[in-house]
Image: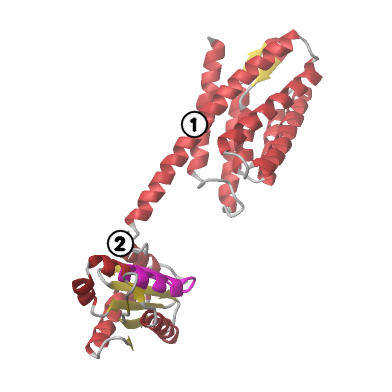
């Protein structure tokens, strides 16, 4: 009963720790994470493992087993070798706080050997097998390393085999449960990301939609690094006639073709949106009027000179009108598309297929 209660305490501590750690990171611990996040993650891992050491399984001959090695396997899969080995070293050093220098030294050497082997194996296998298979292989490595460790420390005898079986059972079960927690969290987060992207993406053109545009404008108005903002309002000329003449499927092709050209020209230069119907918008961050006008003309000419196939034998050409406006005060950013709208209205009244700078 005491063994089961201790195991339950280990699982609770490890599961809660896993939950908090992976709430802080996306899908893996990578070099791009901010230093403070890495520091907090390491501190959480240390606290979790120190608690696990205090809730260790008390076995015969003074043997204490805990689940701290499970975290090394998970870290090896999700983090870089340097992160894994340095974290393992800190965990090993924390063992000395519990006293018994000889046992602590043995535990330190074991966890370091395990971290090095796990990091090396992950490096050569990560892109070749599924993650669950990799974790199983690392578990087998941890079993082998632990058997060697116990043989060297306690000598090889029947009781050692029994202890090894107990250790394998509890570590294997805990690893399975923790990976289940991790998998469920990742799956939930993945679904959340997908739904969020859908909410801010236009389904037909894959451009950002009006909701994304409004949110981006609000964020830009609070960003002190943005000194000026240019907006390009684009509207397909005579789009209603295209729908009436060729049908809505062809109209959809026209929208997709225009969106593709706009996105291609905005790559690393601006953000493109479909605001609704045949109306698009491009935001140029820290663009002056000349740069915005130049981008608008490139897009307009590219669309004008790109015929759109509507069937195997026929293509149609379309044009767009563009209005351009630039705001130099953050207080005006939220109204920038209204200014660009006025320029667009003027472009349409002047005969279409042109760019007007307000």
Instruction: Provide residue 72's location: percent of width, then percent of height.
Output: 64, 34
Instruction: Provide residue 28's location: percent of width, then percent of height.
Output: 56, 46
Q: Residue at x 41, y 73 (%)?
A: 261
- Position of residue 12 relative to residue 127, above or below, is above
Per the image, is 104 magenta? no
Which residue is nearer to you in this view: 132 or 356? Answer: 132
Instruction: Provide residue 263's location: percent of width, then percent of height.
Output: 42, 70
Classify mark 2: helix, strand or loop.
helix
Which residue is nearer to you in this view: 90 or 274? Answer: 274
Disc 2: which residue: 211
Dividing the picture into quadrants, the one containing residue 45 is top right
Q: Is residue 4 left or right of residue 196?
A: right
Instruction: Provide residue 41's location: percent of width, then percent of height.
Output: 57, 42
Q: How packed is label 2: few (under 14 Cα within 10 Å), some, or many (20 or more)?
A: some
Q: Residue at x 48, y 33 (%)?
A: 181
Q: Is residue 38 left or right of residue 216?
A: right
Which residues are the magenta region?
A: 254-274
- Position of residue 32 relative to residue 240, above or below, is above
Residue 13 in sight: no
Is most of the magenta stretch helix, strand or loop? helix
- Position of residue 273 relative to residue 302, above or below, is above
Q: Residue at x 24, y 91 (%)?
A: 350
Per the image, is 261 magenta? yes
Which residue is nearer to you in this view: 197 or 255? Answer: 255
Label 2 to label 1, Cα distance in Å? 35 Å
Disc 1: which residue: 180
């Amino acid at each position: 009963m005491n063994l089961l209660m201790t195991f339950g305490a280990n699982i609770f501590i490890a599961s809660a720790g896993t939950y908090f750690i992976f709430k802080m990171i996306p899908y893996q611990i990578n070099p791009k994470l901010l230093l403070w996040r890495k520091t907090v993650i390491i501190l959480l891992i240390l606290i979790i493992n120190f608690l696990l050491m205090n809730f260790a399984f008390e076995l015969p001959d003074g043997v204490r087993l805990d689940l701290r090695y499970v975290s090394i396997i998970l870290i090896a899969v999700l983090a870089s070798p340097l992160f894994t080995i340095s974290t393992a070293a800190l965990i090993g050093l924390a063992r000395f706080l519990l006293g018994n220098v000889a046992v602590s030294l043995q535990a330190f050497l074991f966890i370091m050997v395990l971290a090095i082997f796990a990091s090396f194996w992950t490096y050569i296998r990560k892109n070749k097998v599924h993650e669950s298979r990799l974790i199983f292989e690392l578990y087998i490595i941890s079993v082998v390393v632990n058997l060697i460790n116990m043989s060297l420390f306690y000598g090889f005898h029947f009781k050692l085999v029994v202890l090894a079986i107990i250790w394998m059972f509890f570590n294997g079960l805990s690893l399975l449960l923790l990976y289940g927690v991790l998998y469920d969290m990742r799956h939930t987060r993945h679904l959340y990301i997908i739904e969020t992207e859908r909410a801010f993406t236009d389904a037909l053109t894959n451009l950002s939609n009006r909701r994304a545009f409004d949110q981006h404008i609000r964020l830009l108005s609070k960003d002190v690094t943005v000194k000026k903002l240019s907006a390009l309002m684009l509207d397909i000329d005579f789009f209603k006639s295209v729908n009436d003449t060729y049908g809505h499927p062809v109209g959809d092709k026209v929208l997709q073709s225009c969106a593709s050209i706009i996105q291609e020209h905005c790559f690393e230069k601006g953000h493109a949106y479909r605001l609704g119907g045949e109306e698009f918008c491009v935001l140029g961050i820290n663009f002056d009027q000349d740069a915005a006008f130049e981008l608008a003309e490139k897009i307009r000419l590219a669309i004008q000179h790109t015929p759109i196939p509507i069937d195997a034998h026929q293509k149609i050409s379309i044009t767009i009108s563009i209005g351009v406006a630039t705001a130099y005060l953050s207080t005006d950013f939220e109204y920038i598309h209204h200014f660009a709208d006025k320029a667009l209205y003027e472009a349409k009244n002047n005969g279409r297929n042109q760019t007007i700078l307000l």
